[in-house]
Amino acid sequence: MRNRQPLSPPHPLGRWRRRRRRGGITGTAVAALLLVACNQASTSLTPTTAASGSRALVAAPDFSDQPSFANRTGRLPGLSLQGMFHPTYAVPSDPSHIRTLLVTGDVIPARGVNYYATNRHDFLWPFRPTADYTKKADITYINLESPLFGGCPLVVTATFTFCGNPRFVDGFTLMGADVANLANNHTSNYGAAGITATDQLLQQHGIKTSGLGPVAVIDVRGIKFGFIGFNGVGRAIDQEALKEGIARAREQADIVVVQFHWGKEYERQPMADPNVPTPDDPVAIGHEAIDWGADVVIGNHQHWYEGIEIYHGKLITYAHGNFVFDQMWSEETREGVIGTYTFYGTQLVAANWKPVRIYDYGQPVFMNAKDSATALQTMEAASDQLATRLHEPTTSPIPAMPPPPATAPEHATS
């Protein structure tokens, strides 16, 4: 078929010429029509100072009640800081499409936690107030920063050689833990024997481990999550191993989750710490992990929760703070957030954080509404500070950074 030129708008004389050929319009009539057309054209070009009609003075349309992007287009929303902290997307309650990943901060059932749980004869005690919440997710992922084995010394002094009673594994089961990250700077405190005993204990109770080499793969209704972990505290992260680990996880899973132990302690912003040494910049490592194929990056170690970043449409969480630990010596170290990350198919579409405060040297309890709002504002402000430094989009309006948290009671009230 020959290409045809697109139809042009009809020429104002076209009809008249055709009709003239048919004998319907005389030359005099055409001249009269042309005169009228020219008069109309000259009139339209004449400047006017007349007031606009009332229709031009109506208010601008208000789009605030319009359907969201996802509802208008049927497409999933892209990630943004604004969407993370001020969501408008209504996640459907459809288990055929929705999967949830819950992530805690540092779990260290050692030292004071081990001492008080042993005295109580209750190794479920640290997990009871939050267990009903943490076990509801499809996958619950903890950072276990202490080897667990029989004969662990019972100490309450400020030692930095951690271990805990193996009966804490029952607490992990109570809270619904599915994967435990062992890539950190304290899992090896009792050498290879401590690592092996801990890994075997967890596997015997149906809890997979990340950070020891193999990818921990969990299938949630046909969607496979792959978990790997890397420690960057006390040494640099092996970037070649990181790249290879992500590629290996990519072959086995639909969603690749990488957890890092990284960054300078007791800070709201991710940064290296040359004194430990912790030489890697968490921002640079997090970006590389996303560039090499990670879907979500999880950070821990700093004992303070930090902000998040959206990098190339993917989520990087730099620190969740403490979850189970005995650091009662400051309010910041008593706090942490439990992150829940919601996927529609294989795409992350929402996140929320539930702040906790630690009482009695080891038991996290959910904060009240006022303190929760302050913690989330702190997290949002820290995220905006990072985004500003990296020249990335912030939330709007940018919230003020709240002052340090006020001193809370040592014991939880029932």
Image: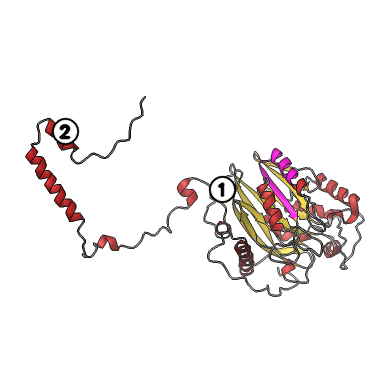
Q: Quadrant of residue 247?
A: top right
Compared to residue 47, the image places residue 6 above or below, namely: above
Q: Residue 259: say if magenta.
A: yes
**Stretch in magenta:** 243-260
Q: Indicate which label's residue lies in the foreground, 1 or 2.
A: 2
Choose the circle earlier in sequence order: 1 or 2: 2
Mark 2, secondary structure of its residue: helix
Specify the label residue 73 is tagged with.
Answer: none
Percent of width and height locating residue 304: 72, 65
Residue type marked 2: Arg
Q: Quadrant of residue 214?
A: top right
Per the image, the residue denoted by label 2 is 18
Mark 1, secondary structure of its residue: loop
Specify the label residue 93 is tagged with.
Answer: 1
Residue type marked 1: Ser
Classify the position of the N terminus by image quarter.
Answer: top left
Q: Residue at x 79, y 52 (%)?
A: 183
Q: Nearer the viewer, residue 260 or 45?
A: 45
